[in-house]
Amino acid sequence: MSWWRDMVCYEVYPRAFADSNGDGVGDLPGVTARLEHIKDLGADAVWITPFYPSPLADGGYDIADYTGVAGDLGTAEDFTELTLRAHELGLKLLADLVPNHTSDQHPWFRAALAAAPGSAERQMYLFRPGRGADGELPPNDWQSAFGGPAWTRVPDGEWYCHLHAPEQPDLDWRNPKVRDAFTGVLRHWLDRGVDGFRVDVAHALFKAEGLPDAGPGQHTDPWRNHLMPYYDQEELHPLYREWRALLDTHPAPPGAVAPPDRVMVAESAVFDPARLGRYIRHDEMHQAFNFAFLEAAWDAVELRAVVDGSYAVPGSAVTWLLSSHDAVRPATRLGSLRRARAAALLMLALPGSAYLYQGEELGLPQAEIPDDRILDPLWERSGRTERGRDGARVPLPWSGEHAPYGFSTAAPGGTWLPQPDGWAALTVAAQQRDPASTLALYRKALRLRRAHPAPDPTAPPAWLSAPDDPVLAFRRGELVCVVNLGAESVPLGLPGRPALASGPLDGDRLPPDTALWLIDPSCEGRADDL
Ligand code: GLC
Ligand code: CA
């Protein structure tokens, strides 16, 4: 079986992971120096978010040079070191590919602005004349995912499309030059030893011919995303087949210790399982993020429906995630650390592969960022109504009693995003000493999960609970997972040996918002076992 079908992949947001040189910004040597944390946790792979030169209008997802390394993060050699160390530790390394848009400081966009309407330079992007008597209205009604129109006008009167910030102009993927350029980018990083890519907004590259209006209700219901003329177009799929073939056939870099076994995962905010399944057909992406799971409420019926729906495409690789650099930390989003810990055991027992985001294993809450330190473009684009994602991106607490908690040797308050007070008990060092810590829970869970693999990671778990039960119970081979999402404690009465609990049990009862793993080699999977 392919390694990635049940891998645990750990997301690193490099500016917030570890700072090696005391400038207050996490960097590549910092990641390399701390890779053992990820190895010890029990992950199989690391996905590192963009580390390329960027003006940082959107946390590095506005790229000015696809084959460079950002000066504040290190050098090309530092990246090579990181790759070598990861491989030495037996970790795969995935890079982030951001093909939908460049930075407005990318040489292609600068050249496009300097060139005339209709020029080859402009055709790399989506420039269009406006509507209205003088072209003073945007070419269509598309809205940016960050708020406001998805169009900005340039001095000569044309408009360009940006589904995110204005500093992130969208490329025209119908232009073969764009396609060729990105084939080169993929080859570049494969030659440097990466084991694959996480593909940013993989549902957005192609826009419907003629750029038709999208109508009302854009970005309000993600279950309708696949209906938008700027998302989920048919033309995406031949492109992903091309990339898959490249990943499957591109030679291993010189000195590689093992033949490449690469993986490509779509960040595709398509919620409808049937539509999402199209990205992970056997010759396309290996995986796609399961955002329906991340967005699901803490509700047994809803979660069970999402879980069942996730296996809709037979044989395809299922993923699970509770957090990312874009999401509110689970301890805050789900209402309590207790729930976040129970959710972790739920997720890590489900057949398939799991993505963890740095700090999730510490149970960090979403941090409060003072108004004047907010960097996320969502804040200004929403008219300062949405605080954005910075609260999930503050530097990791490693050790010590006060900020910067071993993240950096910078003075307290000298980190690029401020850390809150009161995180001393949440540091890696503090949690390493505490067998009841969230870090200890994740470590044990990853070990048990590896020791008790799902017989088929592409098949749904065998449910032991009834569909409307506030308790979710299912089998993953010998491992039985029970999660109490109800308000009352419930009698356990399940066969098997308790192996791991997300919180204290109440005698032989499972308290609310608590999950338990049991090991039972002989369980027949009868619903009335509960
Ligand atoms: C993805 C990234 C997010 C970024 C957006 C635009 O959703 O995860 O951080 O803002 O793409 O590139
Ligand atoms: Ca640094």
Image (spheres, rainbow, N blue to C red):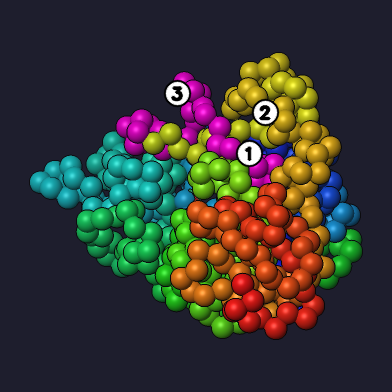
Please state the total of marks drawn on the protein image: 3
User: Which dot, 2 or 3, sits closer to the camera?
Assistant: 2
Q: What residue type is labelled 2?
A: Trp
Q: What residue type is labelled 3?
A: Asp
> Which of the two discs, 1 and 2, labels the residue nearer the N terminus?
1
**Measuring 64% from the left and 58% from the top, which residue is drawn there?**
510
* 420 in relation to 236, above or below: above
Sequence-first disc among 2 and 3: 3
Residue 153 at x, y percent in the picture: 28, 41
Residue at (69%, 71%) from the top-left corner? 494
Determine whether label 2 and label 3 are within 8 Å by CB. Answer: no
Give 311 or 483, whichever is nearer the viewer: 483
Give the image location of residue 280, x and y in percent.
56, 74
List x then y, in percent, for residue 528.
60, 78
Q: Residue 371 carries which label?
A: 3
Rounded to the nearest whole Å, what is the CA distance between mark 2 and mark 3? 20 Å
Is 426 colored magenta in this rendering? no
Q: Which tag is nearer the camera, tag 1 or tag 3?
A: 1
Residue designated by label 1: 364
Mark 1 and mark 3 lie on one chain; the one further toward the N terminus is 1
Residue that protrudes farthest toward the left in the picture: 133
The region drawn magenta spans 359-385
Please report contact status of discs 1 and 2: CB closer than 8 Å, yes or no.
Answer: yes
Residue 367 included in the magenta stretch of the image: yes
Please state which amino acid type lies under the numbered disc 1: Leu
Question: In this figure, which residue is indicated by the disc labeled 2?
Answer: 423
How packed mark 2 is, by other alpha carbons closer than 10 Å (few <14, some 14-19, many 20 or more), is many
CA separation in Å, label 1 and label 2: 9 Å
